[in-house]
Image (spheres, coloured by chain):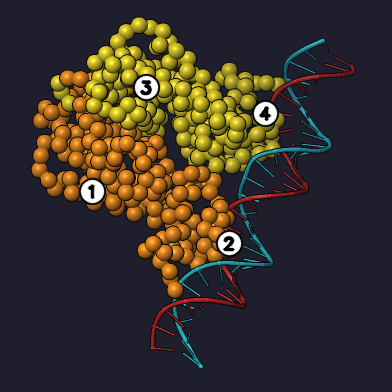
Chain colours: A orange, B yellow, C red, D cyan
Amino acid sequence: MSETIGNLSRKEQVIRKAAELFKEKGYAAASMRDLAQLLGIEAASLYSHIKSKEEILRSLCFDMAAEFRKSLEEVEKQPGSASEKLRNGIIGHIQVMAKDLTASAVFMNEHRHLSEPYLRDFLLLRINYINRFKTIIEEGVHTGEFKNSIDKKLAVMTLFSSLNWMPMWYDPGSAIDPQALGFQLADMLVNGLKKQ
Amino acid sequence: MSETIGNLSRKEQVIRKAAELFKEKGYAAASMRDLAQLLGIEAASLYSHIKSKEEILRSLCFDMAAEFRKSLEEVEKQPGSASEKLRNGIIGHIQVMAKDLTASAVFMNEHRHLSEPYLRDFLLLRINYINRFKTIIEEGVHTGEFKNSIDKKLAVMTLFSSLNWMPMWYDPGSAIDPQALGFQLADMLVNGLKKQ
DNA sequence: TATTTGTCCTAACAGTTGTTTGCGAATGTA
DNA sequence: TACATTCGCAAACAACTGTTAGGACAAATA
């Protein structure tokens, strides 16, 4: 048994479908009966695979968080100027998202429905990640690469806003592929829209 | 009757508090009993002032939409280069948001819970607004002010992502005031982080 | 004074929520 | 063959959902 259709265990199938549902309707508005119906089973049967609705959300949020963290660590290892690091950080972030747009959307929009103490843990991971980007920006301001006229909190928040909304509008079947998207996004944020 | 504490009718008080609640917990997770408790009354009493939960959401979303529209129309009237128009559009958008950060957050995050046909209407207003910004960007590319290397959809979506997340992190009591925020945001998006 | 309007109440409704229990059937392993 | 595991079901649970009905009291209006 344990058919692992397409290399996915039944539990993984449940979590995947849940991610789609959470993305579409939002965590709170998505019921376990909705989810069961999408999988062609009864709601009670879900509990053969998962412990609770929130366990699904937790696994989606924390798995994504781990991916982001891994990506940033790679970037930090490599030497280079602040703009190069920032550029690589942006590209890495986009690539992680592009690997699972659905989970990314849930990660971004639904994490607030985590209960304590998970919510606290999640937010700590998040602020740590953001602060490491902020450090890169501060480094760039310090070396004179970046303007010092811009508020650093504003800069880093604007950066993450741009990145984190990508899963909401990006169509993976479109002309621009994830890598090119990362390149262009990095260019736009670092160099701006204007010709120089 | 009709005490209008602080110039707000009871209905307006209900809608305001609802906005706070919707922002904090999300529309779907916020119950009418939660809202009633915040106002110190029973859930049933809310219905003396409003027709339904969704009516509150509708009024929040469409009132904000009208403000954004009004602001953009002002900008379009005035002559100037594409970067000037874009800059003014950004500053206007930020100012509208800053006037009501709570309603702005709801407008942005909770509009999807509108039922048809309101959702459709809302999305039409939104795409129209976005397209008018896109036109400004295209104009800038055409006149050679902006790079033509950047995908226009990407550019406009990145712009809106940055703008729309502002209510999530901006602290109105902070050092940077809404106008300076608009200036800096416009500068960052048009000219980038890098020194020129 | 009489009447309307605004505001809130208790009680209740029908439906939905996440989840548990106990069971059965099929599949894989010994 | 015997056994364990996986996967699913029906039925039920207590709690919660948005909302309605019908009434009470006070302030504003006539």
Distance between the Cα atoms at labels 3 and 4?
40 Å
Q: Amino acid at mark 2?
A: Glu
Label 2 Cα neighbours within 10 Å, binned few <14 / some 14-19 / many ≥20: some
Quadrant of the snapshot with the N terminus of chain B: top right
Q: Which of these two is toward me, B173 or A142?
A: A142
Relative height, residue A161 to residue B75 (above, below): below
- Which one is in front in this view, the residue at disc 4 or the one at disc 1? 1
Q: Chain of mark 3?
A: B
D29 relative to A44 in the view: left or right: right
Are tags 2 and 4 found on a single chain?
A: no
Q: Nearer the viewer, mark 2 or mark 4?
A: 2
**Are the numbered discs 3 and 4 placed on the same chain, yes or no?**
yes
Give the residue pinned by disc 2.
Answer: A42
How far apart marks 4 and 1 lie (CA) works out to: 51 Å
Which residue is most to the top? B79
Q: CB under 8 Å between callouts 3 and 4?
A: no
* Percent position of residue C24, x then y: 61, 78
In what element is the residue under mark 4?
A: loop
Amino acid on which the number 1 mark rests in the picture:
Ser
Q: Nearer the viewer, mark 1 or mark 2?
A: 2
What residue is pinned by disc 3? B134
Relative depth, front residue between B125 and A144: B125
How far separated are the C-alphas under marks 2 and 4? 40 Å
Placement of A156 over or under A193, stated as above or below:
below
| Residue B49: mark in rendering | 4
- Judged left or right of residue A26, residue D12 is right
Q: Where does label 1 land, which residue? A: A71
